[in-house]
Amino acid sequence: MMQPMSTTTPAGFRNDIQGIRAIAVALVVVYHAGVVMPGGFIGVDVFFVVSGFVITRMLLKEFDAHGKINFRNFYLRRIRRLLPALGLMLGATLLLSTFLAAIAAQPIAARTGAAASLFNANTYLHHVGGGGGGYFGLNAEANPFLHTWSLAVEEQFYLVFPALLAIAWAVATRFRTHHRAFLAVFLTAIGTVSFVVSRTMTFNGGKSASFAFYYAPTRAWEFAAGALLALGAVVLSRINTFNAYLLSVLGLACLAWGAWGFDKRTPFPGNAALVPVVGTMFLIAAGESQSRNFITAIIGSRPMQKIGDLSYGWYLWHWPFIVFAYAVFPQVRGARGIAAALSIIPAALSYKLIESPIRFRKNPAPRRTLLLGATCIVVPLIAAVALNTSHDRVSASSLYKPFALHEDVLRGCSTPTPMGMRENDNCSWDVKNAKGTAVLIGDSNAGQFTEGFVAGANAASLNAKVATQSSCPFANLRLWDWSKEDTTCSYFVSKTLAHLIELKPQYVVIASASDSYIKQSYFTFRSSDGKNLYTTPEEKALALQEGLIKIANILRYRFIKVIIVHPVPKFAPWTPIGMAPLRILGPKKWMDTSITQADAQAARELAVASEEAAATESKATTLDLFSELCPNDPCSTINGSEWGYRDHGHISIANSKSLAGTFQRILSE
């Protein structure tokens, strides 16, 4: 992708094309660095148009000179140009990922890296949804090879496009039609179909939108746009100075519009991709004019050419650098930007020591080129297997024991299936001569108490049962997450409540991340009848209070004691599986975070008040574990030499076990 033209300035070389590549890579790098350019991802579309233009112009020269394409030479040139730098980046990044990539991302990194070496990263990422939520998803930033999807699209274009052009040329020859006119009609037809399909699939959403984003057929129209410019070079060369200047201004305006006017919520590619595609076409057309304008001159200036020369390598290296920086220094402001800037160093070294020597070698032997290409494919594949094997060993080691999942998850107790409807239920801990039953209900913030609750209940001669569903408060209300109703939560609550009425346990312990539901704007509540909407923290606190009262009263009327556990202190976001092994191997203080007791209390103030009011109204009991989990000021994720938290919002198994006595006491009252 983004192959810089030779700096030896062959006939027909255009300095401004390198400058346009410089603009494209800058857009992408700045966007990924997290700088205020929410639509910088359009830089990839700029590259697609440029590639279509450059490759078509190259092939047209062969047609004009020989009447055919030398496919062997074409693909040998592509191997020498693309694979050495790509193979180096893939192999090095896969090996470095063992220590520098987030542990949770290593399996998908290994598979994406393998797919990238086989020119198939785009189809793989479509299949897995970008590694978690698509290209713009929350987990995408952990995959160091996410950016290789566009390289795969370009490589697939190079595999197919020369053959299509040769077929069209042969047809035009057969029917004695003007070659360029026929090619223009042919490419226009392909581009139109591609655009219509891309637009339709984008607005269909879901997997269709993902297909439109990742697949070459739905991106073909962007390459066709550049190819049409190459076909019209003679006409474009006649553009006068004023019109060339006007096209340059409009082209830059389009790119600015896309860079600052688009964001991850923009349906893309769809209609929106027209903006960067047309903008790039304007810039290329302006540069084709024999009447040069100062904007084209600036774009084609020496500094811009230099960046354009490095654009391929910079694109290759910038994203792994950013991903590693985030995994090793997640709380360091500016780490992503610094990493993005530093990534130009391996790009420059790659260009000088690998790309240029291999690319410009005189009379390279075809066999050596093929062997080089095979090596650039096989080595990353071996490295991918090594990373996957390393991940399995590391994740199973004692290194991650403090961050192990709680029993509710391991036993399958954390599921949307309501209590009483679960097959092969493995979520009961019984004792002989039990006096009754205690049930722990709620979301993952209830699940974190499983070990302590079970031990405490059994010590109080009670059978223990656990039923949790992640991100689902156990209250009589309807939860909306990112403007979409979580119907599984309402179903879980209603059916589990019905089972509790039938089971008639002595105690029901309810716990949830009520503070998160209240303060996070992407969570909203509706009343159980759907009539009332609650969006502000104060409204949501009141809704949660009323929802808890209804649940607690239903249980109390059946002589079931209800205990409401207040939310635990929470810290700045971090998770061990989202961090690099190198960070975890270091001193605990590298990962430890702290918060003052005052700030921790303030963060959960509304939630605690809501739950206290609900308990008072329904005659339930509340349990506040704050003093046990935060005995010192400031609160810390580490208790002595042991981890007290498994991530920023959930206590560790060791901490949960330490609460057994507290649960025993409250379950004995």
Image: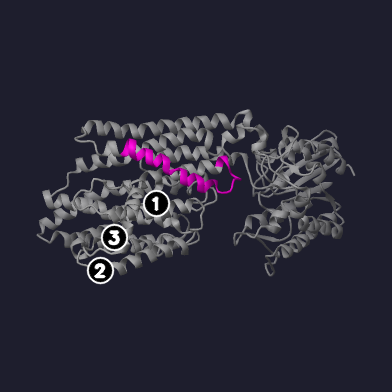
Indicate the quadrant containing the C terminus: top left, top right, bottom left or bottom right.
Answer: top right
Work out whether residue 362 can be spotted.
yes
Quarter of the rendering containing residue 630: top right
The image shows residue 663, relative to residue 481, as above or below, that is: above
Residue position marked by numbered label 3 in the rendering: 284
- Residue 453, position in %: x, y? 78, 40
Prevailing secondary structure of the magenta residues: helix
Quick check: 225 left or right of 429? left
Specify which label sits upstream in the sequence, 1 or 3: 1
- Residue 179, position in %: x, y? 14, 59
C-alpha span from label 2 to label 3 = 14 Å
Quick check: 395 left or right of 467? left
Quick check: 620 left or right of 119? right
The image shows residue 368, relative to residue 599, as above or below, that is: above
Say if the magenta span includes residue 337: yes
Say if the magenta span includes residue 208: no
Residue position marked by numbered label 2 in the rendering: 241
Residue position marked by numbered label 1 in the rendering: 25
Specify which label sits upstream in the sequence, 1 or 2: 1
Quarter of the rendering containing residue 479: bottom right
The residue closer to the viewer here, 208 or 260, is 260
Q: Which residues are magenta?
A: 327-355
C-alpha span from label 1 to label 3 = 16 Å
Q: Amino acid at mark 2?
A: Thr
Q: Amino acid at mark 3?
A: Ile
Classify 10 Å Cα crowding around label 1: few (below 14), some (14-19), many (20 and above).
many
